[in-house]
Image (spheres, rainbow, N blue to C red):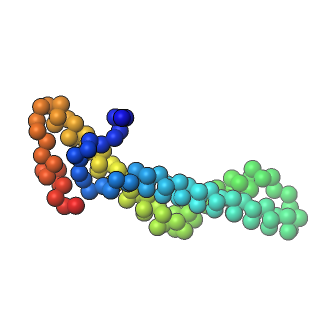
Amino acid sequence: MSDATPPEGATGQQPAGAGRRLARNLALYTLARLGLVVVITVAIVGIARLVSVDIPLVVAALFALLIAMPLSLTLFKKLRTRVNEDIALVDEKRRRDKALLRARLRGETPDEDKDGGTSA
């Protein structure tokens, strides 16, 4: 019913659930990064208490965020790669759908094999 649903006859390289898979992988990657920040924050506060130093939670969280940024790039490389691949799939489908719509608006009959539909 919405404008975002693809036409029934549309075929392409993208599996039907690529958008859902992108959302799931992006949520997992985000939760993993936030979890890393929480773990590092707890570690900073815990170590500070062990040496009898009082560090505000906000300061510990900021330091944890700075430490987690580059660390998450290496620790969660596989998740990040999957998110990037899913983004590429969704973007390619969006481009194909846009070209198909423009061809229809010009009154042309779209040739789906011309857009690379045979490589699937």
Against 59, is 105 above or below? above
Q: Position of residue 69 (x, y in %)?
A: 57, 58
Between 18 and 62, the one nearer to me in the picture:
18
Against 7, is 53 above or below? below
Please give the name of the residue rendered at 75% of the width and 50% of the height, measured from the top-left corner. 58
Q: Position of residue 117 (x, y in %)?
A: 18, 55
Q: How many marks?
A: 0
Quadrant of the snapshot with the N terminus: top left
Q: Position of residue 64 (x, y in %)?
A: 67, 58
Q: Position of residue 26 (x, y in %)?
A: 49, 54
Query: Horizontally, is 23 left or right of 32 in the view?
Result: left
Please give the name of the residue rendered at 21% of the width and 41% of the height, measured from the top-left corner. 99
Quadrant of the snapshot with the C terminus: bottom left
Query: Horizontally, is 22 left or right of 58 in the view?
Result: left
Whether residue 69 can be seen here: no
> Residue 52: which quarter of the image?
bottom right
Please give the name of the residue rendered at 12% of the width and 46% of the height, measured from the top-left corner. 111
> Residue 55: which quarter of the image?
bottom right
Whether residue 83 can be seen here: yes
Query: Horizontally, is 59 left or right of 76 in the view?
Result: right
Query: Horizontally, is 71 left or right of 63 in the view?
Result: left
Please give the name of the residue rendered at 52% of the width and 66% of the height, measured from the top-left corner. 76
Between 92 and 7, the one nearer to me in the picture:
7
